[in-house]
Image: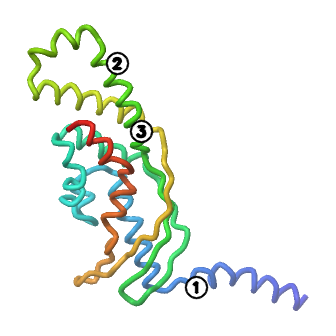
Amino acid sequence: MKHITKLMMVVLLLPILAISGCSESESEAVSAFEQTMSAFKSGVGDEIDKYYSFDRVTAYIDKADGEELCDTVLSTLNAMDYKINSSKTVNSESVILNVTFETADFSKIVSSFIDEAVKLTESSEYKKKLSAMSDEEYNRIMTETMKKCIKDGVGEKRTQTADVTMIKDSAGKWIIGGNSEEVLGILFADLSEALDYLT
């Protein structure tokens, strides 16, 4: 009976020991990262700005040259998913999280866009308009085509795993640190290649 009681105590204590295995810094960094990802998934500028500079996000995707296209790109974040595989404390102000991200695959969106653009430019209706078409009209047509391809292709996923460095800022708040541009690059995988086709 004593052996059974001891065994039950060990079984009950295991989850507590597992939780306590994480340092306080790791727990705080993980929580802050999850809040940041929730804000990104919302696609709402004000929500993202609470945890991550929204200006940096728009600067990253502003090659799009258009608020509507920018909003379409941001809407892909709603379909983004992630899994924290592990966490490691560097020191009291730095924690490294190993994270697997599942995001919209812009390389597939690019392929779709190229196919649609070729069909469009080979159509007789487009060829009739071409001689009188302004740069603005051309950009509008290509932007609308890209928006459609993004909306249609958001279900195509790309999976990447990366180390994300969380740091504590001067106000004591945990934020995505030195490799924040790399994180944006993952969230908007191959976006720059996609937008190059619009210029």
Depth order, front residue of 124/112: 124
The residue that disc 2 covers is 119
**Mark 2 closeness class: few <14, some 14–19, many ≥20 residues within 10 Å:** few
- Dot 2 or dot 1, earlier in sequence: 1
Query: Which residue does the numbered mark 1 point to in the structure image?
Result: 21
Q: Secondary structure at mark 2?
A: helix
Neighbourhood count class around disc 1 (C-alpha, 10 Å): few under 14, some 14–19, many 20 upward: few
What amino acid is at disc 1? Answer: Gly
* Quarter of the rendering occupied by the C terminus: top left
Tell me which corner region of the image, top left, top right, bottom left or bottom right, holds residue 90. Answer: bottom left
Q: Quadrant of residue 21?
A: bottom right
Image coloring type: rainbow
Whether 192 is drawn above or below 146: the answer is below
> Are the residues flagged by discs 1 and 3 in contact, CB closer than 8 Å?
no
SS for callout 1: loop
Residue shown at 50% from the left, 81% from the top: 88
Q: Residues within 10 Å of mark 3 (few under 14, many from 20)?
A: many
- Residue 84's place in the image compared with 88, above or below, is above
- Disc 3 is placed on an element classified as loop
Residue identifier under label 3: 154
Looking at the image, is mark 1 or mark 3 nearer the viewer?
3
Frontmost residue, 7 versus 189: 189
Mark 2 or mark 1, which is nearer to you? 2
What amino acid type is highlighted by mark number 2?
Lys
